[in-house]
Image (tube, rainbow, N blue to C red):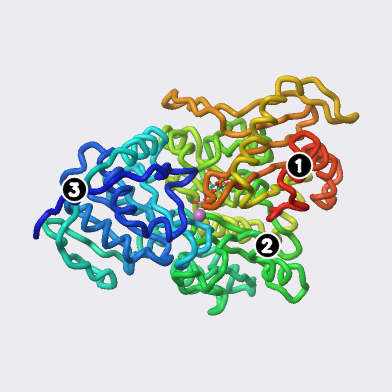
């Protein structure tokens, strides 16, 4: 079979965002668009000859086509082996595990996560390094630079591989191994959690509903929750991955999982509800009469992790993204362990995890995970919750309330303004940034005095690198915060994310409505940034 070198011309927009390159499918379908980006990745890596590359995706529309392209190009660029999930499927955390488990050189994760799929939806390509995590900025920047000057790519004149067929095939001189996407991941979960205790919980009549949102976690949840843990058939809903996610929006939040939320708020509803996103790295946790915010979930999981066998020895540290609430900080303080605040995006946790400085990480965007892989992990969070419930023999609501009663509560919300005009959005952020130095020390009401106001700059304590302009934060003396940043995963216009947080002490009021509790901060942020006024929107597109 012949290696072909194909001439191409560069695109100027292949800059990876928070989590890889994400665009409309229509953009990816432009001539050589995918090939250019893949070649830019391969050109930015040293020593790929003879190495193993893992490839998998969330099953969304175009996954199958891109995988065949990637396999041919991997062969032409000298990889020795590709490992790919059956039918091209691998959840993001499973891909991370497979890379680590088989000591692969790296991997390609094909997903646009929680964004809708289908011919008019989104697609995405992300490169993960051999440690299993998303490539650090040094690599993504090199890829972007390369993509702007690329003139040729290498591919193979070879037929498609049979992705449904488990086992080994060849593509040119390269071995292609099609693996079951679930087996290795399920085995890993079994080492971390007390499956017997969770199975007993289900056997005792504990009821759960899990919404796989017609996306990647279906096969994993069927195998783990229903087959291994004995949850009744039907516990997993929408468990078959569909290329267009059943025309749904596979984002596990209170907007797209409203039906589940409503069900959990009724007496007849199940004891526990959970969901995951398109690529399986996010989680939604709802107990009967109790939605758990992702920021609280991080704090709760960190405080209770020792109840699961994989964390019995205790956790060494916690990391959270900057916009995530400080609830976890209080847990770290009590445990006397390290606490780190990083920019948004899982790639910033990698060094801390590799260096053994943190065990558990989380983001306010429904992402939690640990040092078992180098991605956030939706089902992992669900299983850890189940393990904790099984050991404590309490409801989610009881566990959450007890937590607040000992640590206090961080009221927290995020307001997203999606598909805003990009120029308006960036001017808005620039204007707010320009006001920052004048804000410090100002009093906006009795209890809202600005303690600091800056644009978050992260110094990685492990490799010494610096990442600037990671979001504007205005902190108040009582611990309240307003954070504003532009999304790095949107595919149309700009998305403004406004994050609001207020701390209520352990003996304070823990039963206020979140939007009401944060009302004064919401009003103040409008006064300072003028999002509604400048964008002409009456309200956020999504409130989480
Ligand atoms: C969003 C979230 C961020 C998350 C990222 C990828 O990024 O805010 O916390 O890491 O998505 O998640 P942004 O730049 O749009 O705010 V996923 O589940 O899309 O891989
Ligand atoms: Co995701």
Determine which residue is flagged by label 3: 77
Query: Mark 3 packing: few (<14 Cα in 10 Å), some, or many (20+)?
Result: many
Q: Position of residue 397 (x, y in %)?
A: 74, 58
Query: Mark 1 packing: few (<14 Cα in 10 Å), some, or many (20+)?
Result: few
Instruction: Kindly indicate whether the residue at mark 1 contacts the one at mark 3 (C-beta within 8 angstroms).
Output: no
Give the quarter of the figure containing the N terminus. Answer: bottom left
Determine which residue is flagged by label 2: 255
Left or right of residue 355, residue 418 in this image: right
3D distance between C-alphas at marks 2 and 3: 44 Å
Please say if 415 is above or below 280: above
Q: Position of residue 105 (x, y in %)?
A: 27, 45
Q: Position of residue 165 (x, y in %)?
A: 25, 72
Please say if 467 is above or below 241: above
User: Comparing marks 2 and 1, which lies closer to the viewer?
Assistant: 2
Residue drawn at (29%, 43%) of the image: 40
Residue drawn at (22%, 67%) of the image: 161
3D distance between C-alphas at marks 3 and 1: 56 Å
Query: Mark 2 packing: few (<14 Cα in 10 Å), some, or many (20+)?
Result: some
Determine which residue is flagged by label 1: 406
């Amino acid at each position: 079979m012949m290696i072909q070198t194909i001439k191409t011309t560069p695109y100027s927009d292949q800059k990876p965002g928070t989590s890889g390159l994400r665009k409309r499918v229509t953009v990816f379908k432009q001539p050589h668009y995918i090939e250019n980006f893949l070649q830019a990745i391969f050109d930015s890596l040293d020593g790929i000859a003879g190495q193993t590359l893992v490839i998998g995706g969330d099953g969304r529309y175009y996954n199958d086509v891109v995988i065949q392209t990637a396999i041919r190009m991997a062969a032409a660029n000298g990889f020795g082996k590709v490992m790919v999930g059956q039918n091209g499927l691998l959840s993001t955390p499973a891909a991370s595990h497979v890379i680590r488990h088989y000591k692969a050189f790296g991997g390609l994760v094909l997903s646009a996560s929680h964004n809708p799929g289908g011919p008019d939806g989104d697609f995405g390509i992300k490169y993960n390094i051999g440690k299993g995590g998303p490539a650090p900025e040094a690599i993504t920047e090199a890829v972007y630079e390369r993509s702007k000057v690329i003139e040729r790519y290498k591919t193979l004149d070879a037929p498609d591989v049979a992705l449904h067929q488990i086992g080994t095939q060849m593509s040119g001189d390269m071995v292609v191994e099609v693996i079951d996407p679930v087996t290795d991941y399920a085995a890993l979960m079994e080492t971390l959690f007390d499956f017997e205790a969770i199975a007993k919980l289900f056997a005792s009549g504990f009821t759960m509903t899990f919404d796989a949102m017609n996306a990647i976690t279906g096969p994993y949840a069927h195998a783990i929750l229903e087959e291994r843990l004995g949850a009744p058939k039907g516990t997993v809903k929408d468990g078959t991955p569909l290329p267009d996610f059943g025309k749904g929006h596979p984002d596990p939040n209170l907007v797209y999982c409203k039906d589940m939320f409503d069900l959990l708020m009724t007496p007849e509803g199940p004891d526990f509800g959970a969901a995951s996103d398109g690529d399986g790295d996010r989680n939604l946790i709802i107990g009967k009469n109790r939605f758990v915010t992702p920021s609280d979930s991080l704090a709760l999981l960190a405080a209770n992790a020792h109840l699961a066998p994989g964390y019995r020895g205790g956790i060494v540290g916690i990391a959270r993204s900057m916009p995530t609430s400080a609830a976890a900080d209080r847990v770290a303080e009590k445990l006397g362990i390290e606490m780190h605040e990083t920019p948004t995006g899982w790639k910033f946790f990698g060094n801390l995890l590799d260096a053994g400085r943190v065990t558990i990480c989380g983001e306010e965007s429904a992402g939690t995970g640990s040092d078992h892989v180098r991605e956030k992990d939706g089902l992992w969070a669900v299983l850890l919750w189940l393990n904790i419930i099984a050991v404590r023999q309490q409801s989610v609501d009881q566990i959450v309330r007890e937590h607040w009663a000992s640590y206090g509560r961080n009221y927290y919300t995020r307001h997203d303004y999606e598909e805003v005009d990009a120029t308006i959005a960036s001017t808005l952020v620039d204007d707010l940034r320009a006001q920052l130095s004048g804000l410090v020390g100002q009093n906006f009401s009795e209890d809202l005095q600005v303690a600091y106001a800056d644009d978050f700059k992260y110094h990685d304590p492990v490799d010494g690198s610096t990442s600037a302009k990671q979001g504007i934060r205005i902190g108040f003396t009582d611990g309240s915060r307003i954070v504003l940043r532009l999304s790095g995963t949107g595919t149309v216009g700009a998305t403004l994310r406004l994050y609001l947080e207020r701390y209520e002490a352990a003996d304070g009021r823990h039963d206020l409505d979140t939007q009401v509790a944060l009302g004064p901060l919401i009003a103040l942020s409008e006064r300072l940034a003028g999002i509604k006024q400048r964008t002409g929107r009456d309200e956020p597109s999504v409130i989480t």
